[in-house]
Amino acid sequence: MGLSSDGKHLHVSEGEYSALIEQLAHKVHQSKWSFDIVLCLARGGLRPGDVLSRIFDKPLAILSTSSYRAMAGTAQCELHIAPYISCTSDIRGRVLLVDDMVDSGETLHGVVAWLTTEYQEITELRSAVLWHKAVSIFTPDYVVEFLPTSPWIHQPFEKYDGMKVEDL
């Protein structure tokens, strides 16, 4: 992974991204914690959540959230949480909440509070992310990389941001 010399940008390739997800799966496995369902936050948690769901052979649930809408998706604003979770099974028991990163921590903090209120059949909730930035107010249970300089992360699929089908 390419951290810029000033520590403000981290560039991640497809291969590095996949390896990080596999490392996250290994960390969860090493903890010996058993969970019933993977709940990923869309959009950032979709890829890690999908892979963890496949590796652990657990149902995948999806919750859409949005907070990075200002300044073409580069500035955080008010957190919006979809009113429903998309899943083919009930949201109950032990839930692994997955996102790509914890930046400010506002999203995961807000989602955990919302889940605690709206889904009282959840008996245990743990969180898993690829990156944990130092500026975060939220500390996830499982993390692959702690980023002390809190860089902007350039993920491989961001090449599609702003791209139109005509550009393909």
Image (tube, helix red, strand yellow):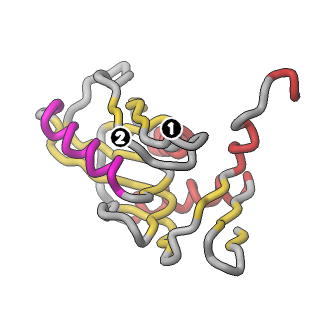
Q: Nearer the viewer, residue 38 or 32?
A: 38
| Residue that mark 1 sits on | 69
| Type of amino acid at the residue the image marks with label 1 | Arg
User: Residue at left 17%, top 32%?
Assistant: 119
* C-alpha separation, residue under disc 2 versus residue under disc 1: 9 Å
| Residue that mark 2 sits on | 78
Few, some or many C-alpha atoms within 10 Å of disc 2 (few <14, some 14-19, many ≥20)?
few
User: Residue at left 42%, top 41%?
Assistant: 67
- Across and down, in percent, residue 43 comes to 51, 37
Q: Quadrant of the C terminus?
A: top right
Q: Is residue 88 left or right of residue 149?
A: left
Q: Is residue 52 left or right of residue 18?
A: left
User: Residue at left 57%, top 56%?
Assistant: 22
> Above or below — where is 49 with respect to 149?
above
> Above or below — where is 6 with respect to 109?
below
Q: Nearer the viewer, residue 117 or 57?
A: 117
Q: Quadrant of the N terminus?
A: bottom right
Q: Earlier in the sequence, mark 2 or mark 1?
A: 1
| Type of amino acid at the residue the image marks with label 2 | Glu
- Across and down, in percent, residue 41 comes to 42, 39
Chain part drawn in magenta: 105-119
Q: Quadrant of residue 28?
A: bottom left
Of helix, strand and loop, which one carries label 2?
Answer: loop
